[in-house]
């Protein structure tokens, strides 16, 4: 992560990593989503995410597609490879420390034209959330739960999708309800545009949410949530049949939470395994 990128993440609470996926990765990931499209579950009724906000409402819900890390070859491969993507791993080393681990299972988000938005949320404010935080001390950034969102389709200005309130990860006061509902202060909410193959990394501390999807093409985002190696948000024991599909490098990212001092194996910056190189 360059000094400029550290500045941008520290100031904004997110960063866009361009061209993290190759054209072949994008094509295979999209073919896999097409293959399993009948498993997409649209969040309607009590699963709706727009929280009753008129500004975020839509004609249908966000589509969720689970289980991709367990899909058979070749369909699951591009998603398993995202766990140890060599362009993205150095960012996670810097933001979460070596030994970062997958916290939640992968969730693929799809949105078709008219899909509703998601009320804005984030863990900054007057309290301290010990699982989702952003701190910078002595020139080093420390993050709790952190989202790594790979894009399989372009997100153009006005399409909708992920939005953030840049800088809000450092906020000390409660976020106004009208802002969270997309009903006021819209100038402070930034839609994040990007191309297929880009990856957006953001801290769960930054206030973020989803704008309704207006484009004719489907939104497709593979959303991973990582934690530092010592921390867990969700209880999780990865099942043996999932681990069997993983390479040795990918399995390192599925280690349970514990101190790196206890011989925690970590990925090197080039994505290969190595012993822990610094005490976290
Ligand atoms: O639409 C997005 O990318 C945001 C998703 C999100 O914040 C969530 O699922 O909690």
Image (cartoon, rainbow, N blue to C red):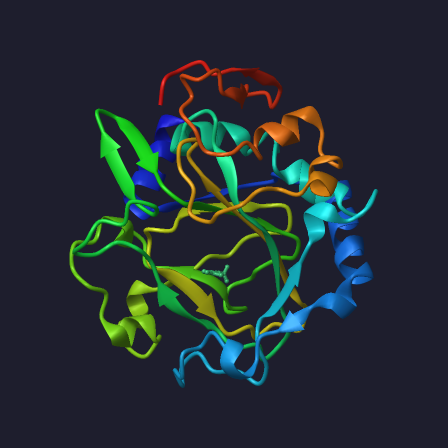
Q: Is residue 3 above or below residue 153?
A: above
Name the foreground residue: 179 vs 262: 262
Residue at the image point whose x is 54% and y is 34% from the top: 88
Q: Is residue 246 above or below residue 28?
A: above
Residue at the image point whose x is 48% and y is 15% from the top: 263
Specify the quadrant that holds the N terminus: top left
Q: Is residue 147 visible?
A: yes
Q: Residue 191, percent across and down?
A: 44, 62
Residue 163, by quadrant, is: bottom left
Q: Residue 23, percent across and down?
A: 74, 43
Q: Is 267 on the left or on the right of 91, as rendered? A: right
**Looking at the image, how many numbered discs can be counted on the residues?**
0
Q: Residue 274, percent across and down?
A: 56, 15
Q: Is 220 on the left or on the right of 244, as rendered? A: left
Residue at the image point whose x is 50% and y is 27% from the top: 90
Residue 21, by quadrant, is: top right
Q: Is 56 on the left or on the right of 115, as rendered? A: left
Residue 186, by quadrant, is: bottom left
Specify the quadrant that holds the C terminus: top left
Q: Is residue 22 visible?
A: no
Q: Residue 220, percent across and down?
A: 64, 59
Residue at the image point whose x is 57% and y is 32% from the top: 253
């Amino acid at each position: 992560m360059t000094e400029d990128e550290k500045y941008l993440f520290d100031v904004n609470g997110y960063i866009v990593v361009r061209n993290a996926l190759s054209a072949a990765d994008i094509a295979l990931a999209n073919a896999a989503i097409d293959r399993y499209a009948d498993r997409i579950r649209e969040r309607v009724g009590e699963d709706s995410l727009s929280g009753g906000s008129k500004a975020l409402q839509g004609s249908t819900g966000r589509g969720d597609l689970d289980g991709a890390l367990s899909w058979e070859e070749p369909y699951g491969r591009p998603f398993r490879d995202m766990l140890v993507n060599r362009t993205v791993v150095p960012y996670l080393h810097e933001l979460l420390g070596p030994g970062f681990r997958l916290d939640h299972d992968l969730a693929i988000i799809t949105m078709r034209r008219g899909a509703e938005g998601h009320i804005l949320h984030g863990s900054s404010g007057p309290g301290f959330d010990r699982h989702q935080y952003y701190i910078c001390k002595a020139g080093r950034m420390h993050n709790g739960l952190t989202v790594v969102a790979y894009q399989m389709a372009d997100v153009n200005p006005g399409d909708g999708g992920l939005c953030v309130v840049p800088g809000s990860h450092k906020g000390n006061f409660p976020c106004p309800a009208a802002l969270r509902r997309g009903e006021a202060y819209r100038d402070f909410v930034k839609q994040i545009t990007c191309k297929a193959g880009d990856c957006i990394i953001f801290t769960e501390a930054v206030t973020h949410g989803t704008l309704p999807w207006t484009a004719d093409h489907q939104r497709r985002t593979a959303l991973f949530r990582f934690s530092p190696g010592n921390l867990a948000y969700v209880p999780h024991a990865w099942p043996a049949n999932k681990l069997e599909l993983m390479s040795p490098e990918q399995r390192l990212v599925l280690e349970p939470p514990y101190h790196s001092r206890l011989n925690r194996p970590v990925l090197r910056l080039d994505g290969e395994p190595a012993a822990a190189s610094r005490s976290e």
